[in-house]
Amino acid sequence: MSEIDIASEKKKQFLLYAKLPVFTRRINRARKRIAEWLSLVDKPYIAFSTGKDSTCILNLVRRQAPDIPAVYFDADCAYPESYELLGNTENIIIFKTDESLLQTFHRFGGLDAGPELERETMKTTVWGPIKRLIIKYSFDGICYGLRTEENPKTRGLHAKLRGPIFQYKRDGLWACQPIYDWKYMDVWAYIFSNELKYCAVYDKLWAAPIEDQRLSYWAGETKRRYGRWAWLKKNYPDLFNRFAAEFPEARGYV
């Protein structure tokens, strides 16, 4: 079955699911969480990765507060489709990371640096930029699309301990994770039932296992178990060749 056929069948499933009461209840809970969060903040922002979860968050929040800016951290490794979606998103701040993702890879010696590399990429593409962002714009709140289903051991535990709304001790930022208890079906049912524009990279991912239908930087975590480099070479040969020119060991994975 082709990706087009799979996408068509999935869309039918999502739209049927969107008619169920459980889906309506989850939307209503998410809206209440956002409303409560908005009552606590004066200058918040929406974390927007161009992924499916943050696409839902962007729409849910802006239905209540249309003027809230969205922020995308640019590590110079976004898919062309992500840049296209960003170009069609209103009130978007494209904020450069501390260094490009490829620069971080180089600092740690390539693809096989291990867990230390993963932690360092979080520092340079998330933690560091957030600190600079808050200082520059004086933001006091963030809403993001993390879900426990994608990482129950860490995200699930944090959500259980903190709840959907909490305040970070390090900077006083009020955080809201309104769809932390949503499932895969909820996310896509919301996107298709509301006819939202989503990143077209997903149209190349429908045949992948659900856990690998995650959008990241093309040199990052996307499809790590689904043959990341082979998939990149097949679907984005120019990007793969760019990466392999700097890290020849990538060719050993395809």
Image (spheres, rainbow, N blue to C red):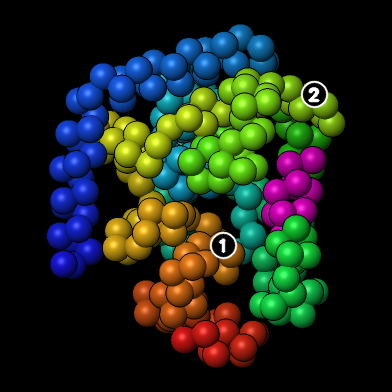
Vertically, is 247 above or below 182? below
Q: Amino acid at mark 2?
A: Gly
Indicate left or right for 187 with 221 as reference. Answer: left
Residue range (magenta)? 121-131
Q: CA distance from mark 2 to mark 1?
A: 29 Å
Viewer-nearest residue: 10 or 100: 10
Q: What SS does tag 1 mark?
A: loop
Which residue is labeled 1 in the image?
A: 221
Indicate left or right for 58 with 42 as reference. Answer: left
Residue 124: in magenta span: yes
Q: Position of residue 217 (x, y in %)?
A: 55, 61
Q: Amino acid at mark 1?
A: Glu
Q: Residue at x 56, y 41 (%)?
A: 152
Q: Which mark is residue 190?
A: none
Q: Quadrant of residue 53?
A: top left
Indicate left or right for 189 with 238 as reference. Answer: left
Q: Position of residue 6 (x, y in %)?
A: 20, 58
Q: Residue at x 67, y 16 (%)?
A: 41
Which residue is labeled 2 in the image?
A: 172
Q: Position of residue 247 (x, y in %)?
A: 64, 85
Q: What SS does tag 2 mark?
A: loop
Residue 95 visible? The answer is yes
Q: Are marks 2 and 1 in contact (CB under 8 Å)?
A: no
Is the residue marked by circle 2 packed among few (<14), some (14-19), or many (20+) residues within 10 Å? few
Vertically, is 23 above or below 191? above
Indicate left or right for 193 with 80 as reference. Answer: left
Q: Residue at x 73, y 22 (%)?
A: 167
Q: Residue at x 57, y 11 (%)?
A: 36
Viewer-nearest residue: 131 or 206: 206
Residue 27: in magenta span: no
Q: Total marks drawn?
A: 2
